[in-house]
Image (cartoon, rainbow, N blue to C red):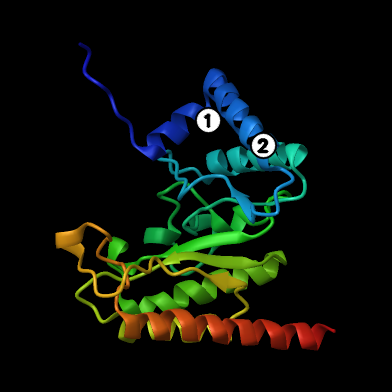
Amino acid sequence: MKEAQYKTTRDLVSASELDVKSQQVYRNYIKTLVNRYKDSPAVFAWELGNEPRCSSGNYTTILEWATSTSRYIKSLGPNHMVTTGEEGFFDASDGVNNGQGVYSGVDGTSFAHNIKIADINYGTFHLYPNWRSYPYSWDNTWIQEHDVIGKEAGKPVLLEEYGTPFPHNHTETITPWLDTILASGLAADQIWQFGPNGTSVAPTNFADEITISLADEFKILGKDHAAAMLQKKSARMEEDS
């Protein structure tokens, strides 16, 4: 029996982008899926991938892939929005912040370039400061930077995933982020993630260390914040009417 060989997502993206046969299989999959649901009101948008990266460190590979793929999806089902699903990293050439770490292009993506793709309807970014050892004081800057880029591109931006692990107090840590979101022009945000009340991580395996599973935290970070965002949206609609 041959030993199974596994590759990381970033390796597969780098390899398959350059392989014609892989791209055809990929396009066939897209065609089947989009054609099945292209008239469904239950589909909010198509996302090209979950946190796509490219180990080459050159943002143009992902840019070209996202451009051609989003165009193909729109040709099949023009009634649904399309987005990248990216984490929101920048390339050093974007001139954002200090050009280091998540701003350096090491992950082969550029939020500033991807959001300008014609068939990308809105931008996405994620916020998990513990993954890259950034201090929590940096988090609000990350939110504001993507808000600015979105406004410059004239497109909505969604903070698609964000969270902080135990043993941090979720409410204490995340509330300042929500204040920044409310003060920004972000279209929406989606916390990762809510779970059954009172469940713990290790014994149940119902959740990961970032899951919010306490009723009091859910009220503040979930229900109250959702109500505030809805009120903000309603106020904007009245201003535009």
Q: CA distance from mark 2 to mark 1?
A: 25 Å
Drawn side of residue 7 relative to residue 152, left or right: left
Looking at the rendered structure, the secondary structure element under dot 2 is helix
Residue 168 x, y percent position in the rendering: 23, 78
Residue 145 disc label: none
- Residue at 62% across, 72% down: 187
- Based on the displayed image, in which of its 4 quarters is residue 21 positioned? top right
Looking at the rendered structure, the secondary structure element under dot 1 is helix
Of the pair 146 and 58, the residue shown nearer to us? 146
**Is label 2 or label 1 in front?**
2
Q: Quadrant of the C terminus?
A: bottom right
Q: Amino acid at mark 2?
A: Arg
Residue pointed to by mark 2: 36
Residue 145 x, y percent position in the rendering: 53, 72
Give the total number of marks visible in the rendering: 2
Toward the top, the furthest residue is 1
Q: Quadrant of the N terminus?
A: top left
Dot 2 or dot 1, earlier in sequence:
1
Residue 170 x, y percent position in the rendering: 31, 79
Residue 18 x, y percent position in the rendering: 53, 26
Q: Amino acid at mark 1?
A: Glu
- Residue at 43% across, 44% down: 57
Residue pointed to by mark 1: 17
- Based on the displayed image, in which of its 4 quarters is residue 63 positioned? top right
Of the pair 231 and 130, the residue shown nearer to us? 231
